[in-house]
Image (tube, rainbow, N blue to C red):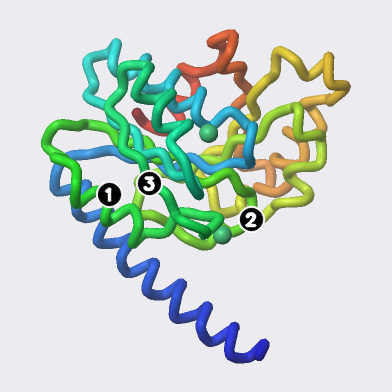
Amino acid sequence: MHIIQVGMEYDVLRENNKIAHENYRLMKKHGIKSVDIMGSIGAGKTSLIIKLGEKLMARGQRVCAIAGDVTGEDDFSRMAASGMDAYNCNTGHECHLDANLVRKVLEGIDLDKYDVVLIENVGNLVCPADFPLGTDYRAVVVSTTEGDDMVRKHHDIFVHSDVAILNKMDIADAVGVDPEVIMEDYSKLTGGLKGMYACSVRKDEGIEEILDALRL
Ligand code: MG
Ligand code: ZN
């Protein structure tokens, strides 16, 4: 049983990577910059995407978001209500997006209408790491409310991400979490090469730095 699972997983991951490359080429053909935003439930992925979208649209960029969720339209509705074009992508029962699901969504979008595509992955810090979607950048968002051990517990997703973001800096004191611990863990993980981007989406602090880090 275990051996069969390993074999299947290899094929699944290889197929995913192939489709991810196709997604990448498709978006490049239309001059699109894209980001896969990963993180657990409640980290603030939707709010961050809305904030990034607002700032980019204020600069004249044409932005859309893809809301990945197991089921429902909550994130999609929030994005759409913010004035951003949004597309919903329900996985059914999978706890992560994969390149094939994203390809189906991209095929239904007039890609000439956009400069930037922001993809919200399903709330999960484990398996999204294994499934690249074909975006330029992969970002992981954690929040101070999740405790100070997120990097130590989930280092895979931090290793697989280009940019790491620590949200809810404004309430770190209130929840008794020292952001320095989280940021030091991340710095250690990257051999001191990369730092984490601290922000508060709610207070609109640190967002410009994230846009720069994502080359948006
Ligand atoms: Mg969300
Ligand atoms: Zn999963």
- Please say if 41 is above or below 127: above
Dot 1: what SS?
helix
Q: Is residue 64 left or right of residue 9?
A: left
Per the image, the residue denoted by label 1 is 105
Instruction: Residue at 14% x, 32% y: name it.
Output: 113
Q: Are marks 1 and 3 in contact (CB under 8 Å)?
A: yes
**Label 2 residue near ligand 2, CB within 8 Å:** yes
**Label 3 residue near ligand 1, CB within 8 Å:** no
Q: Quadrant of residue 186?
A: top right
- Please say if 110 is above or below 115: below
Image region (quadrant) for ligand 2? bottom right
- At label 3, counting other C-alpha atoms closer than 10 Å, the crowd grade (few under 14, some 14-19, many 20 or more) is many
Quadrant where the C terminus is found in the figure: top left
Instruction: Residue at 35% x, 48% y: name it.
Output: 135
- Please say if 14 is above or below 149: below
Dot 2: what SS?
loop
Instruction: Residue at 65% x, 29% y: name it.
Output: 166
Residue type, mark 1 in image: Val
Disc nearer the start of the sequence (1/2) = 1
Q: Which mark is residue 89?
A: 3
Per the image, the residue denoted by label 2 is 126
Q: Quadrant of residue 200?
A: top right
Instruction: Residue at 43% x, 23% y: name it.
Output: 78
